[in-house]
């Protein structure tokens, strides 16, 4: 009887063990599912800029040109269309780079992680109320800035606000577009191995981090400036010029407040301005060098000028305006694209040969004439 009871106890214990194992497995699977579906969290403070969920954590940190940490300011929530956005704000003049550290925090084997992407959207503006959610097909809408097939160790991406001389862009080194609004979004994909009803990959975003890189206030900037230039050759074999403001007063101002103008006169007294839009007021009788918009741009600290095949003397003017459109400073420089006719070395050689032949012939003639005189 005791042996029979022991047998039942063994069977019951075995069933309980099996049940417990399945229960624990089910509980772990569901707990992990609950974790993977947790809401993403965005932590915003001047010391901690973090996106995270139960699987990944992404940290952002700003540095200046000397590799010292730059402390940002955090904007109040701004309602843009139907969503509130909080910006991490940096001065363009103080920020050189943003380092983005990405790492996986969940190593549970129930999920097969397939890859990660860091996506970027950008808008060149200093107005934080503009709709960064809808770029309307602008150039920098939803770029995949960084991607990597799944690896627990993900390299840090260094995102430079401006292009850097001597550095090449790669998967871990990226260049930005100067001042403006940036949106970074981290997305990963995975397959839930414990759920056979969902064999396809699932893509999940852990949220977005918004940065406002702000230019210097044009109304607070002052100081005179001059213009430097470098000469190159255009496609029409005339001189082309790259002009630049010769100090850094306005280096980090919004380029829309810095505008370049061209006025020229050729050897036939024909007068020119850069584009049709410049043919106003006293310039309505002038000809436009370019019919539409100037293809190389006319705003900013530098200005590339190609005269489009026109030989003339040109006056290049840089105007700087305040936020109300009033002229606050100006500078002018004069250059020319008129070709100076130079005698080629070939013609000099030919003329030299002719003169030498004439000289030799003259000597021979003199010698012949003197011999003839002696004969007589």
Image (tube, rainbow, N blue to C red):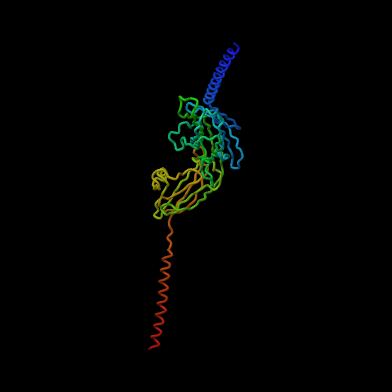
Specify whether 216 is left or right of 232.
right
The answer to whether any part of residue 187 appears in the image is no
Q: Quadrant of the C terminus?
A: bottom left
Viewer-proximal residue among 352 and 61: 61
Viewer-proximal residue among 52 and 212: 52
- Which residue: 60% across, 12% down? 2
Q: Quadrant of the N terminus?
A: top right
In the rendered image of this protein, does residue 271 appear above or below residue 342? above
Percent of width and height locating residue 45: 59, 30
Count the marks.
0
Percent of width and height locating residue 245: 52, 47
Percent of width and height locating residue 121: 48, 35
Spot the residue most to the top: 1
Percent of width and height locating residue 346: 42, 65
The answer to whether any part of residue 232 appears in the image is yes
Viewer-proximal residue among 55 and 163: 55
Q: Quadrant of residue 252?
A: top right
Spot the residue most to the bottom: 376
């Amino acid at each position: 009887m005791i042996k029979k009871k022991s047998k039942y106890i063994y069977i019951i214990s075995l069933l309980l063990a099996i049940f417990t194992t399945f229960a624990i497995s089910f509980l772990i699977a569901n707990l992990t599912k609950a974790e993977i579906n947790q809401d993403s969290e965005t932590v915003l403070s001047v010391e901690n800029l973090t996106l995270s969920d139960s699987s990944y954590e992404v940290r952002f940190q700003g540095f200046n040109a000397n590799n010292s940490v730059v402390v940002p300011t955090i904007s109040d929530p701004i309602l843009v269309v139907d969503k509130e956005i909080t910006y991490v704000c940096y001065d363009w003049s103080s920020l050189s780079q943003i380092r983005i550290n990405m790492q996986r925090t969940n190593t549970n084997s129930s999920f097969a992680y397939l890859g990660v992407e860091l996506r970027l959207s950008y808008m060149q503006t200093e107005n934080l109320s503009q709709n960064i959610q809808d770029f309307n097909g602008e150039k920098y809408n939803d770029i995949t800035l960084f991607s990597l097939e799944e690896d627990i160790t993900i390299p840090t991406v260094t995102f430079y606000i401006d292009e850097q001389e001597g550095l090449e862009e790669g998967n871990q080194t990226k260049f930005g577009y100067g001042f403006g609004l940036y949106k970074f979004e981290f997305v990963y994909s995975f397959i839930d191995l414990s759920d056979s009803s969902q064999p396809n990959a699932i893509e999940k975003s852990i949220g977005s981090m918004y940065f406002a890189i702000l230019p210097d206030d044009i109304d607070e900037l002052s100081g005179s400036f001059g213009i430097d230039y470098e000469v190159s050759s255009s496609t029409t074999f005339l001189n082309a010029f790259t002009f630049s403001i010769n100090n850094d007063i306005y280096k980090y101002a919004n380029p829309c407040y810095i505008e370049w103008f061209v006025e020229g006169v050729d050897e036939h007294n024909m007068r020119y301005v850069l584009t049709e839009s410049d043919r106003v007021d006293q310039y309505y009788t002038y000809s436009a060098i370019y019919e539409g918009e100037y293809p190389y741009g006319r705003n900013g600290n530098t200005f590339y000028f190609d005269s489009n095949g026109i030989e003339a003397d040109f006056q290049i003017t840089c105007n700087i305006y305040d936020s109300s459109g009033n002229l606050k400073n100006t500078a002018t420089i004069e250059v020319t694209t008129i070709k100076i006719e130079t005698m080629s070395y070939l013609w000099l050689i030919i003329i030299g040969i002719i003169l030498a032949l004439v000289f030799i012939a003259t000597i021979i003639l003199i010698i012949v004439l003197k011999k003839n005189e002696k004969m007589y």
